[in-house]
Amino acid sequence: MFRYLHSYFLLAALVLSSLLFTLPLISYLPETGEPIIFGLTGIVNGPELPASFSNNFWVLPFLGVVVVLLLVIMLLLWNRRNLQMRLAVFTAVLLLGLEGMMIFFAFQIPYVLKFSHRMFHVGIVFPLAGFLMVILAIRGIHKTELLELTRNHFRTAGKS
């Protein structure tokens, strides 16, 4: 399974995507009181959001779970590189969508809760780092596929 370099890139993307569920993404600093922490599953501690806004939080954990499951499937499909390549492209698009949704919520929550200060944590860039790891894995999968095709070409050419 970990015979190829692209498997390590996928493993790194899996670790980064899994850490998103445990790390805070943004802290909102009110004028008085404790900071309000926003994670992938929503606001951890703080006031309730209006129902029309809080109903949209299901997208972030859903995208996070789908990305983690796709990365696990890609790691298990190490010998089926064509399917692995297609899933990697789809996962890269999902990681960009996850980052976009996180940024969207990061800039919309202060308007709803009327906060002026926000502080970003390191977890906010994990989907971008995971995207880069998946892109590197795509390149590695492609190179491995070309190497296998070349090896098969020369193996069959010598047996005639």
Image (tube, grey):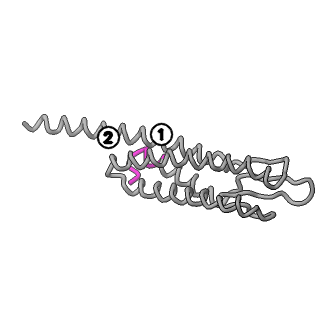
In the rendered image, residue 62, in percent from the top left (x then y), is placed at: 56, 60
Judged from the image, the secondary structure of the residue bearing numbered disc 1 is helix
Residue at mark 1: 136
Return the residue nearer the eye: 75 or 100. 100
Residue at 63% of width from left, 49% of height from top?
101
- Which of 3 and 29 lies nearest the eye of the viewer? 29
Q: How far apart are the alpha carbons under marks 2 and 1?
A: 14 Å
User: Quarter-wise, where is residue 137 in the image?
Assistant: top left
Q: Residue furthest front?
A: 52
User: Is 47 within the magenta?
Assistant: no
Q: Quick one: 86 or 116, which is closer to the camera?
A: 116
Considering the image in quadrants, where does the N terminus appear? bottom left
For the C terminus, which image quadrant? top left
Is mark 2 in CB contact (under 8 Å) with mark 1? no
Residue 74 image position (x, y, % from top left): 41, 53
Image coordinates of residue 80 in percent, x first then y, are: 32, 51
Binning the other alpha carbons within 10 Å of mark 2 as few (below 14), some (14 to 19) or many (20 upward) gives some
Which residues make up the magenta segment? 1-9
**Residue at 31%, 40% in the rendered image:** 145
Q: Identify the residue at image location x=43%, y=49%.
A: 7
Label 2 sits on what residue type? Glu
**What residue is shown with label 2?**
145
Query: Which residue reaches farthest left?
Result: 160
> Is 5 in the magenta?
yes
Q: Nearer the viewer, residue 42 or 34?
A: 42
Position of residue 58 in the picture relative to residue 148 (left or right): right
